[in-house]
Image (tube, rainbow, N blue to C red):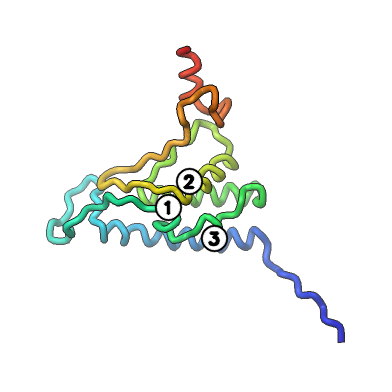
Amino acid sequence: MEHQQVRNQYTITDYVLQLVKDVDTSIAKSSAFFKRFAYKNGTDVNEEFVPSYKCEGVFKMSELFEISQQALPQTEKLNDEDVAQLAKKLEQLWNAYHFQADFPNALPIRQKYTLMREKWNCEVKLASRGETHIEFCHHEPKNCRFNGYCTICNDLKDED
């Protein structure tokens, strides 16, 4: 009897759909996380609830979100639709944990996704109020990796 090779029926798009569900799970956990750490969002916090510490720790994004960097597919393995879906969803996840990605204006979505993926294992500091801004521009016009998109470096070039 011949054995027929069983092919994996799943595609990268199927994987992306599952990853989006995992991101949604992490987003849902964010409010409980901030309650546990008594995050202040500009309103008064019930002093009886506030533990002796405030939410001002340093975390690796991958650990905070409970999603490893390896779980995020490399950009070149994704089609345009999958990249757009993941980039949007990851930005929502960052926002849920009060991170603001400061991308250069009009940066293509593939570059946004790549940058977020690169930052995934970085340590980030949570603020007890407001947002933590994550910048991607190093303010070096000669070495800018966002040629044509980075208004900061374009402004610095004009000052020279």
Residue 88 image position (x, y, % from top left):
51, 48
- Residue 109 is situated, as x and y percent measured from the top left of the image, at 57, 41
Q: Nearer the viewer, mark 3 or mark 1?
A: 1
| Dot 1 amino acid type | Met
The circle drawn on residue 19 is 3
Observer-side mark, 2 or 3, equals 2
Q: Looking at the picture, which amino acid does disc 2 mark?
A: Lys
Callout 1 crowding tier (Cα within 10 Å): few <14, some 14–19, many ≥20? many
- Residue type indicated by callout 3: Leu
Number of the label disc, if any, that sits on residue 61 = 1
Residue 5 lies, with reference to residue 40, above or below; the image says below
Q: Residue at coordinates 29% horizontally, 46% vertically from top-left?
A: 127
Toward which corner of the image does residue 143 lie, by quadrant?
A: top right
The residue at 15%/56% (across/down) is: 46
Mark 1 residue element: helix
Secondary element type, mark 2: helix
The quarter of the rendered structure image containing the N terminus is bottom right
First in residue order: circle 2 vs circle 3:
3
Q: Residue at x 33, y 50 (%)?
A: 58
Say left or right for 61 vs 107. Answer: left
Residue wearing tag 2 = 119
